[in-house]
């Protein structure tokens, strides 16, 4: 073990950037510092992981490694489980402090963080975590959440550190990053988009400069959303830009546009985008407050509604699930959207919601296994948003309005010329295209009736009040103390799935 001089280790996870990075800023004050990223077997083996996500992550890590090296900070990559990686590294470098950002992640990351905390206590390492979104850890009440979110988003941004201490004889050098093949992963059929901090800022700048004009209309159609959406979701997921930077840059752009001699139309579109930044953290807060919503129904009154939820005695219909995952349900808009997602890793918010609604209501599938397929396909998989939305779009929150999307109506509204269908479903209209897998009217009517009946029971209504108090947005006007005489209307929330932007 080397010198015991104060040494900071920055543990980078989903925060692969220089700007607005509290752990890096703090480490720059230390006599000795280095940074670490860990490619964890738990992630690679998880049912949410896809090689496309790993390729994107490696690209972002490589770019950050180059940028940090230019400032005198080695960025090491280790493959292995934590805290063993930390233990092994400490034999080489007796780091005294561990710095990282908080993470609201899937179940395996919660387990890992508890193990790291126990290791730090045992080894006498001071571990400090900073928030990087509007999610509040150990939140006791949603009262005042919106103002606390705003306080974080308007706080001063941290500049990129200018440099780090590099003592003579510092022997720790980064190793080449592994390839997907070396990791035993297949190359994605279509390469992911550019990753890294420069790509994130270029994407934001292009959107704010004018690409965001028409944003509110462009959100819903798979034809216009490709360029009309901000396309920042994967950058926020991997932390190549901070939520605070996006928020402040957007607000700074809106202000001059709002004047009569500015561009009020663009200002209104960017204002709509800014509102979705708040919803991003609102949904993540739910998983932070209740981690088990990744695995079980938020509203326990719907337990047993569908096979496969751990309560219902039936089994998941594997044939229906496979047809949905592969885009061969016989419902053209569903199949075209699923094939686009499987091929590219991205789909706009309305079509994501339609896919989940179809799985839950038309096919009667419990949200967990469809959710795992989507998590693998989404390059921008954000656990807090994803699992909250899977439950909301499946009618399992007990408090949100039931949204059941008609694939035929979505095709008429969002792809009136059929361009999207022709691109992703070339066999449509030929004998090769399958017949509908279910009778739409019968399937939807049955489960819709059961859900409405469940929601009218006294236990379900009492549970909904408790869930609204715990997880609901206070912006809805729900009183924060006394129970109202009449149950308020559920708050309006974006009908999005994963990507809110």
Image (cartoon, rainbow, N blue to C red):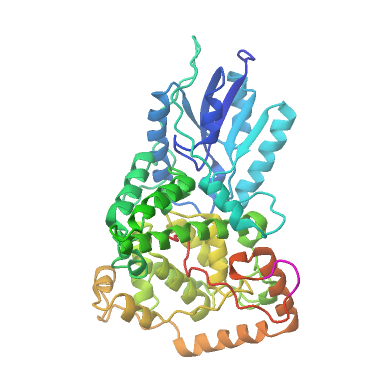
Q: Which x, y percent locates residue 251?
A: 42, 52
Q: Quadrant of the C terminus?
A: bottom left
Please tell me in which quadrant of the rendered image residue 412 appears.
Answer: bottom left
| Residue 302 located within the stretch drawn in magenta | no
Q: Can see residue 59?
A: yes
Main SS, magenta region, reads loop
Q: Which x, y percent locates residue 252?
A: 40, 49
Write the residue at 39% across / 37% down: 179
Name above or below for residue 279 compared with residue 14.
below
Q: Nearer the viewer, residue 476 or 78?
A: 476
Please tell me in which quadrant of the rendered image residue 91 appears.
Answer: top right
Q: Can see residue 106?
A: no
Q: Nearer the viewer, residue 427 or 254?
A: 254
Q: Is residue 162 left or right of residue 456?
A: left
Q: Is residue 427 left or right of residue 128?
A: left
Name above or below for residue 378 compared with residue 301.
above
Q: Is residue 460 left or right of residue 432?
A: right
Write the residue at 76% across / 71% down: 482
Outermost residue to the front: 260
Name above or below for residue 280 compared with residue 116.
below
Q: Which x, y percent locates residue 67?
A: 39, 29
Which region shows up in magenta? 479-483
């Amino acid at each position: 073990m080397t010198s015991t001089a104060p040494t900071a280790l920055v543990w980078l996870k989903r925060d692969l950037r220089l700007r607005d990075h509290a752990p890096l800023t703090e480490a720059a004050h230390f006599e000795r510092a280095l940074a670490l990223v860990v490619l964890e077997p738990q992630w690679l083996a998880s049912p949410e992981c896809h090689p496309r996500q790993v390729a994107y992550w490696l690209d972002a890590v490589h770019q950050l490694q180059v940028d940090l090296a230019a400032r005198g900070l080695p960025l090491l990559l280790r493959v292995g489980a934590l805290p063993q990686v930390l233990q092994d590294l400490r034999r080489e470098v007796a780091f005294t402090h561990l710095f990282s950002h908080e993470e609201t992640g899937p179940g395996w990351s919660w387990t890992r963080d508890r193990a790291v905390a126990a290791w730090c206590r045992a080894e006498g390492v001071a571990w400090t975590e900073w928030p990087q979104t509007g999610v509040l850890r150990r939140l006791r009440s949603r009262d005042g959440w919106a103002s606390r979110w705003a306080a974080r988003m308007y706080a001063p941004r941290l500049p990129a550190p200018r440099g780090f201490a590099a003592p003579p004889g510092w022997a720790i050098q980064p190793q080449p990053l592994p390839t997907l093949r070396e990791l035993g992963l297949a190359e994605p059929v279509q390469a992911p988009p550019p990753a890294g901090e420069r790509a994130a800022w270029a994407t934001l700048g292009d959107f704010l400069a004018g690409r965001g004009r028409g944003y509110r209309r462009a959100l819903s159609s798979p034809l216009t959303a490709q360029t009309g959406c901000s396309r920042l979701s994967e950058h926020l997921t991997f932390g190549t830009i901070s939520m605070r930077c996006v928020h402040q840059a957007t607000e700074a752009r809106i202000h001059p546009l709002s004047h009569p001699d500015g561009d009020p139309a663009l200002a209104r579109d960017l204002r709509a985008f800014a509102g979705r930044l708040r919803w991003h953290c609102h949904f993540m807060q739910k998983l932070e407050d209740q981690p088990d919503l990744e695995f079980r129904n938020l509203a326990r009154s719907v337990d047993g509604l569908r096979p496969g939820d751990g309560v219902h005695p039936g089994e998941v219909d594997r044939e229906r699930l496979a047809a949905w995952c592969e885009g061969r349900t016989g419902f053209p808009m569903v199949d075209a959207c699923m094939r686009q997602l499987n091929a590219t890793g991205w789909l706009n918010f309305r079509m994501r919601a339609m896919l989940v609604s179809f799985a839950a209501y038309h096919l009667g599938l419990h949200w967990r296994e469809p959710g795992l397929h989507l998590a693998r396909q989404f390059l921008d998989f954000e656990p807090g948003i994803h699992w909250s939305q899977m439950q909301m779009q499946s009618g399992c929150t007990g408090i949100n309005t039931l949204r059941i999307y008609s694939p035929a109506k979505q095709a008429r509204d969002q792809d009136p010329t059929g361009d999207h269908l022709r691109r992703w479903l070339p066999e449509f209209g030929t004998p090769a295209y399958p017949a509908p897998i279910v009778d739409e009217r019968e399937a939807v009517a049955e489960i819709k009736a059961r859900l409405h009946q469940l929601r009218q029971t006294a236990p379900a209504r009492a549970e909904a009040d408790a869930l609204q108090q715990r997880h609901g947005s206070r912006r809805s006007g729900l009183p924060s103390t006394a129970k109202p005489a009449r149950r308020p209307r559920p708050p309006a929330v974006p009908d999005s799935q994963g990507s809110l932007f």
